Image (spheres, rainbow, N blue to C red):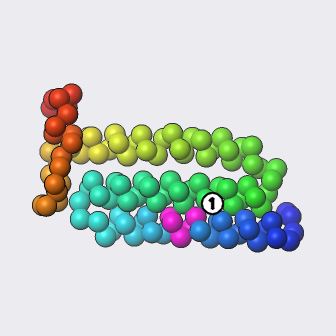
Amino acid sequence: MTDGPLELIGALVVLAGAAFLFLGGLGLFRMPDIYNRIQAGTKATTLGTLLVMLGVGIIMPGWLPKLILVILFVLFTNPLSSQVLARAAHRAGIAPVLGTLADRLAEDKGDQS
């Protein structure tokens, strides 16, 4: 492990990532419907995970090449999986919360159930 300011910076980045992960988990309980929960969970947990991995990479520079591969995997899979979950929920007939102004999936001509 390294000593000094680099370790402190890495620890602060990990702490910021942990805060985003906590807020993403909190969003899963606080949001009113599945679509908002997917949105809150995906954005916050993606950023939280990336920050945690970046912080670990700062603390342990030898791990950085492997962590970059994991970061790229998370960047590609998290948004895609949330989009697939939202589309599946919509096709299953789960209605958005009352007061939703637009339903873009219903307007999409390719969304034939």
Quadrant containing the C terminus is top left
Is 87 in the magenta? no
The answer to whether residue 78 is left or right of residue 55 is left
Magenta stretch: dominant secondary structure: helix
The residue identified by callout 1 is 52
19 in magenta: yes
Q: State the residue at coordinates (26%, 56%).
A: 34
Q: Secondary structure at mark 1?
A: helix
Q: Amino acid at mark 1?
A: Val
Above/below status of 68 relative to 3: above
Q: Residues within 10 Å of mark 1 (few under 14, many from 20)?
A: many
Residue at 46% x, 60% y: name it.
44
Q: Horizontal and vertical percent for residue 31? A: 29, 66
Q: Residue at x 13, y 61 (%)?
A: 99
Which residue occupies the foreground of this view, 84 or 8? 8
Left or right: 78 in relation to 83? right
Residue 38 percent location from the top left of the image: 34, 54
Most extreme residue toward the left, as rendered? 98
Question: In which quadrant will I find the N terminus?
Answer: bottom right
What x and y, as percent, mark residue 85? 32, 44
x%, y% of residue 77?
48, 41
| Left or right: 34 in relation to 81 | left
Residue at left offset 16%, top offset 39%: 106
Q: Is residue 28 above or below residue 81?
A: below
Q: Which residues are magenta?
A: 17-21
The answer to which image quadrant residue 32 occupies is bottom left
